[in-house]
Image: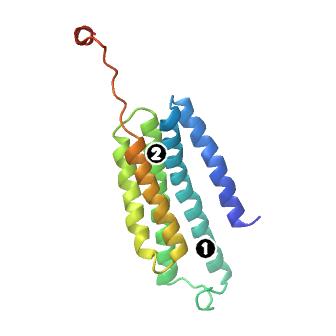
Amino acid sequence: MDIDQVVQIVLLVGLIVVGIDHWRRGQRGWRLAALAFVSLYGVGLVATMSAHCADIIHNLVLRNRSFVDGSPFTYNWRTYSLLLFGVLLIDRGIRVLRAARRFAGGDASARTDILRNGAVVLAITLPIIPIHAFFGVLISVWSSLALIVTAAGLRARQVESSRFPADAVRA
């Protein structure tokens, strides 16, 4: 099985699992859709960057040839930085997933954590666009969409007040 197929399966299973989890926590409608999207973003970061790190380690162990210059993979600054890049984004993906779960459970402050972690991912990936345009653009656009969805779709629930202010005071 190809690593891309494994990532696609993880994304599909992840979407189903987080969707069910948020639904079981009482989320419905647009709020459920927004949480599912943000959670898929987190799952996507974890899945794709785990595959990225596994691929780097696989090529390093087998001393495969680099697509860039044809030299064999060795442990050097480039390999280290590729692994560090993956680990940083895996960490942010896990943080987004945890914050989305907390938000679904009623913690409105988790929204700030989702926004902060999405912004950090965007700050990490925007500068790689000139180096690796495909993944730089892909992750940067996905991060931007996650930020927009979070900002627009994940707001604290307003407490419903009575039509009569006196009733609200007595309650």
Percent from the top left, x then y, of residue 32? 51, 37
Asked if residue 56 is positioned above or below residue 152 in the image, the reply reads below
Residue that label 2 marks: 98
Residue 23 horizontal side relative to residue 126, left or right = right
Asked if residue 160 is positioned above or below residue 171 in the image, the reply reads below
Residue, x 65% and y 84% (percent of image)?
63
Percent from the top left, x then y, of residue 53? 57, 69
The reply to whether discs 2 and 1 touch (Cβ–Cβ < 8 Å) is no
Quadrant where the C terminus lies?
top left
Q: Which of marks 2 and 1 is in front?
A: 2
Which type of secondary structure does the marked residue at label 1 adopt?
helix
Task: Give the image quarter of residue 88.
Answer: bottom left
Residue that label 1 marks: 57
Residue, x 37% and y 47% (percent of image)?
151
Q: Mark 2 and mark 1: span between their CA atoms?
A: 27 Å
Dot 2 alpha-carbon crowd within 10 angstroms: few under 14, some 14 to 19, many 20 or more: some
Name which residue type carries label 1: Ile
Residue, x 57% and y 42% (percent of image)?
18
Task: Give the image quarter of residue 122.
Answer: bottom left
Percent from the top left, x then y, of residue 123? 37, 66
Dot 1 alpha-carbon crowd within 10 angstroms: few under 14, some 14 to 19, many 20 or more: some
Residue, x 68% and y 80% (percent of image)?
62
Taking the image as drawn, is residue 92 in sight? Answer: no
